[in-house]
Image: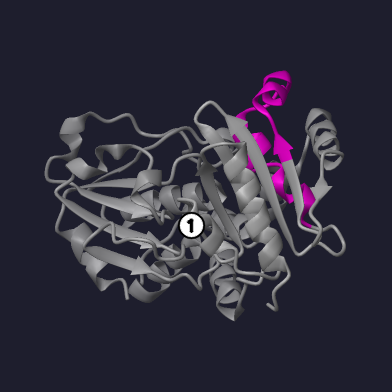
Amino acid sequence: MFEQIIQAVQDHNTIIIHRHHNPDGDALGSQLGLKHILRENFPDKKVYAVGDGAGRYGFMADAVMDDIPDSSYQGALAVILDCGSSHLISDERYTLAQALARIDHHVFCEQIAPVEVIDAASESCCGLITDMVMECGLMISPTAATLLYTGMVTDSGRFRYDCTSSRTFQRASFLMEHPIDVNELYRCLYAADFDQMKLRAQFTLKVQFTPRNVAYIYTTLEEMAQLNADTFTISRGMVNVMADIKGVDSWVNFTETEKGVLCELRSSRYNINPIAARHGGGGHAKASGATLRDRQEAMDVLAELDELTGEPS
């Protein structure tokens, strides 16, 4: 399954690893995990990880991105991870590379590279990198194992989401054969300071419902200016305050920015990806996102989600 990826690595002296912007645990875990794996197994290669900052995942090992000149791409292989659409790739210089490869687990939207391994049934991109290690007999350090495990945990919702399968636990078991400090990992991932707890409480009180019980939050640009939090924290970070409300199968968080309205859609029952795709976004069957033009388009998305929720799953 990964033979062409490994061959591409062997054929190039420089490998530059990209992922989507505003990275989550899976994007960073797969990117940094692969970086460590390639450096360990191909010590003669130059391996870099590039993109925007790690944000709240800055606790992850080697989370500071490499600062490389454009000339590094000459003759290089660019590997794109955890990204279903080209416009979401962080650092557009991947187009300067001599060759491209992609490993991803999002619903297929477009071909980005000549060599691609895509499995939308996988709980995470980190899981696919773990598969590659297992199938190809690659060496993996405790640091790389921890990075990959972090991405699996975050993208599976601590193994709660229905993307979790027996294969997920096989991968996790393999990684856990290495010394991973799970207590420290969970402390970094889930410990919240009091200000964060107050912010979540504030957003819980903002929740509204459609006639068919779709939960939603809408945060205006003016409200954003009054909050002591970054856009990522408000948009993706607050969407799941609605995740465990009894009787709610779908929920959406809208966040106004200068560049449009960020839309994070989630469902525990329905495939909401087509709605995101119709509005220029994408993602997974039950977790997708898009950037909308304005509030009116946001309300159109909400109406579509409300209509979907009335259909048999």
Q: Is residue 262 magenta?
A: no
Where 66 sits versus 20, above or below?
above
Is 116 positioned to the left or the right of 167 in the image? left
Report the residue marked by disc 1. Answer: 278
Give amino acid for label 1. Answer: Arg
Local crowd size for mark 1, using a 10 Å CA cut-off: few (<14), some (14–19), many (≥20) = few
Q: Quadrant of the rendered structure where residue 118 is?
A: bottom left
Q: Which residues are magenta?
A: 218-243
Q: Residue at x 71, y 67 (%)?
A: 309
Q: Nearer the viewer, residue 99 or 34?
A: 99
Residue 299 is situated, as x and y percent measured from the top left of the image, at: 65, 46
Q: Residue at x 37, y 55 (%)?
A: 37
Q: Visible in this render: residue 184?
A: no
Q: Residue at x 44, y 55 (%)?
A: 82
Residue 53 is situated, as x and y percent measured from the top left of the image, at: 48, 32
Residue 136 is situated, as x and y percent measured from the top left of the image, at: 33, 72
Q: Residue furthest top?
A: 226
